[in-house]
Amino acid sequence: MYGITDLSITFLTGFPVITTLVFLIFIGFSFYLYRRTNPPLPRSIRILLALLRLTAVVALFLALFEPVLSYDRIFERKPRLTILKDVSGSMEISEEGKTRLQRIDSLVSSPSFSPIADAFDIRTVLFSDKPSGDIESLNRDETALGAVVEEQARREAAEGSESWLILSDGISNHGLAPAEAAARIKTQINAVGIGLESSEQDIAVTGVDYNDIVFAGRPTEITVRLEWTALKNETARLELKNGARTLQRKEINLGAGTLKDEIKINFVPEQPGQQTFQVTVSPLNDEMSDKNNSRSFSMSVMKSRLKVLMVSDRLDWEYSFLNRFLVRLESVDLTSVVSRLGGGYLATPFPVRQAELNQYDLVILYDIDVKAYQARVELFDSFLKEKEGGLLVILGENYLRAPYPRWLDAYLPFLVKSRGPRMIYHKFNGIPEENYLFHPVVRLGDSRTAIRDAWRELPPFETIIPVDSIVTGAEILVGSDLGEGERTLPVLGFRRLGPGKVLAGAVAPFWHWKFLVQGVKREAKEYGLFWNGVVNWLALKEESEPVRIVPDKNIYTRGETVGFDAFVYDLGFRPITGASGYIMLKSEATADSNLVQFLETGEGRYRAEMELIPSGRYKYLGVIEKDGQKLKEATGEIAIESYTVEEFRRKPDFAAMASAAQLTGGEFVLLKDADSLWADLNTDKISMSEHNEIAVWNKIWLLTIFIAALGLEWFLRKRWQLL
C-alpha cells in the first residue's frame, strides 16, 4: 500500500509536565473568565469570547510545546533515463540521403520508442566536446565521449538516472577513451550505434611518421599511412609538397576492398629552419570526401649534427639500449664516457676543461657516482648557464648512496633529503601531466587520447626513487601510478638554470619499452619517440632565449584555436611585466591578415589566441615591446588543415561504444536492432520512501492566530463594554 505511514508527533520542550499543567490552568481560566460577565452577556457571546481566548492560548502553547509532526511517505516513480545525444560534426555526415543526426531524430520519434518515452522520466543531454543542454555552447568540431561520460556522472552525483542511453557514431577524438571513463562510473550505459558501415569510396591519410629533426642536404624518409574503403583496384598519385613546390611524386596502387598501407617517401630538405610539408593523395572519382586526403607536418631542418656526451659508471641493459639507439641516430654524434672500476675510464675520459665540455649540446649522466664527479661542478655550472647546454640525469642506486646534501641536487628538479633512502620496487606506469601532454618528452602519440593510452599501455617501470622534495620552479612532466592510497611520486621532471635545461628521470627501466614490446611482435616506436623527444628538446637552443614567441604547434586542424605564447624575461631570466605586443598571421594564398594582441598572464608569460582561422599556410610575425622598445620580433609559419578532426574520421567507431556499455552492464546495438534494446530495458517503476518532519511550533501562522484571536477578543470586549 502506498501513501502516508508511521504518522507521529513529538514535543521538543524541555519541561513537558510543567508546560502541560500551565496549559490546562490557562484553558480552565479561559472558560471561568466568561462563566459570568459584567454587564451580563448572552450565552452565545460568552462562548465566542471564551473560544477566542482559548484559541490564543492553544496557539501560544503550541509554540511552547515545540511539536514536530513526523511521517513516512511511500510512493512510486518512473525510472529515470538520460539520453546522451551526439551532435558533433561527424553526425552531419549524410548516408543514403539522411544524416546521422536525422537518424537519431527519426529513432526517438518512431512508434517503437513511444513506450520508452512513456515508461521513463527522460532527460536529454546534447554533447560534443562536453555535455550541455544548449547546442550553441558546444564546440562541434571535436568529440570527447570519455570526458562527456565522466562529466555527466559528476553532474548526476546527487540525483542520478537509473540508466543512460547514448546515441552516437562512437567517434571520439579528444580526451579520455570512452571505456576508461565508463569503468569509473556506476550508472548502466546502453548505446545505439548511429551510422552505416559505408560502401562509398573514400581514401584517407591517417598519419605521417617522420623525424622531428633532420639535416639540410641529407636524405630523410617519411612514412605515409593510408586507409581506403570500397575501392576497386584504383590508382592514385601521392605527392609531397613544401608550399607550392612539389618535392616528390609517387604513383600508388589501392587494392580492392577496405584496406590500409604504408608508403615510404625519401627526400632531401634543403633550407635550414622550421619547415612545413604536406602529403596529398589525389582525389578519386565519386569519392565520399576529399577533405581527409592530405596531412601536414613540420620538421626542424638543422645545419649540423647534435653532439651528445653520455656518462655512466656501469655497463648494463639500460646503457646498452640507449647507447645503441643514439649511435644509430643520424642526428647525433655520440661520445661515451664509462668509468673503470677502481678509477679511470674505459676509453674516452671525461672532459677536464670547460672548452672540452662546452663542445657538446647535451650531457647525459646515467646513475653516476655522485662523489666522483664533485670536482666537475664548475664545469657543469658553466655548461648550463653560459653554454646554454642541456643536461639529462637518470637517477639510480648511486644517487641514493650519496649522502644529502649532494652537489648534484643543485641542478635537479626533485631530490631526496631523507637519511638512508631505499629504492622502491614496484611495477607501475607513468601518468603524464595534462598540461604537458604535448611536451616533446611526453608526446608519444598524435592526440591527447593517444598520448595517455601510450603511457598506460607501455611495459611498466619497476623501480622508482623515493623523492621527498620538489624544487621551487621545477615542473613535473610525468607522475607515478603506484596504486590506490599511495602518494604520487615524480617520474620525469625538469627545471631551468638560466638558459640551460635539466631533465631528470627517477625510474627504471626504459629499455623494456624496446625489448618487451618487440617481444610481442609490435613495433616499439614509443622508445624511439621518447628518446628523440628528450634529445631534441634538451639539445636544441630555440627555447633558450630570454624573450621568445612560439605557437602551440605548427600544424592545426580547421576549427582549432590558434594560440601563441610569449615568454618575456631579462638576461637573468627574471620575468618582465607590463610588456605588450601582437601576433599577425598572413595567408600565403590570399594575403589576408589577422592580428591579435598579447595579453599578460603572469610571471613573464603572455598569450594570444585566434579563432575560426580559414585553412591554408600562414606566415606569422610576432612582436614584443616594453616602454616603446622592441624586445623581440619573431617570424615563422604554421599550417591549418582543410579538415577538422570530425571530418577526418568518417567511419563509426562502434567498438568504443560497445566496450563502454559492456563495462557498466549495459548493451550496445546497431540502429537497425534498436527495438531489441527497448525490449530489454527495465521499465519497472521505482519504489521510493521518504521521511518528512514538519515543525509546527516555528511557523508564522501560529503568531498570526495568536494575535488575531486576542485582537478580536479585545474588540468584542470593548464593543460590549466588559470590565
Image (cartoon, rainbow, N blue to C red):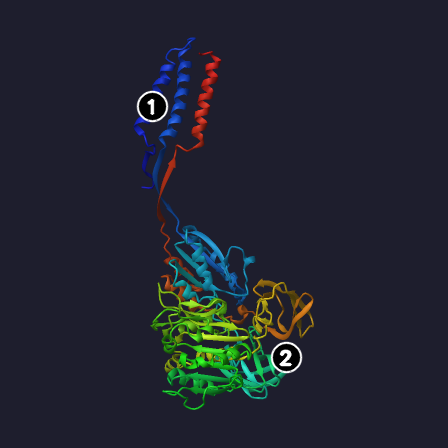
Quarter of the image holding residue 547? bottom right
User: In the rendering, at what x and y percent does residue 159 appear?
Assistant: 41, 51
Q: Locate residue 91 relative to residue 11 in the image: left or right.
A: right
Viewer-proximal residue, 303 or 148?
303
Q: Is residue 247 above or below residue 640?
A: below
Please state the horizontal and vertical placement of residue 559, each as a whole percent of the image: 58, 67
Q: What's under tag 2, amino acid-wise?
A: Gly
Within-10-Å neighbours for mark 1: few <14, some 14–19, many 20+: few
Mark 1 residue type? Val
Q: Secondary structure at mark 1?
A: helix
**Splitting the image into 4 quarters, where does residue 157 fall?**
bottom left
Q: Which residue is mark 1?
A: 22
Q: Is residue 459 above or below residue 54?
A: below
Residue 123 can be seen in this image: yes
The residue at 67%/74% (across/down) is 589
Figure label count: 2
Q: Give the image location of residue 528, x and y in percent.
A: 46, 81
Q: Nearer the viewer, residue 2 or 517?
A: 517
Mark seen at residue 243: 2
Residue beneath the point at 36% across and 21% down? 26
Q: Earlier in the sequence, mark 1 or mark 2?
A: 1
Task: Specify the quadrant that holds the C terminus.
Answer: top left
Inter-mark Cα distance, 1 to 2 = 99 Å
- Horizontal placement of 395 versus 276: left or right? left
* Observer-nearest of 624 and 559: 624
Q: Nearer the viewer, mark 1 or mark 2?
A: 1
Question: Outermost residue toward the bottom?
Answer: 347
Percent position (x, y) of residue 426? 34, 72
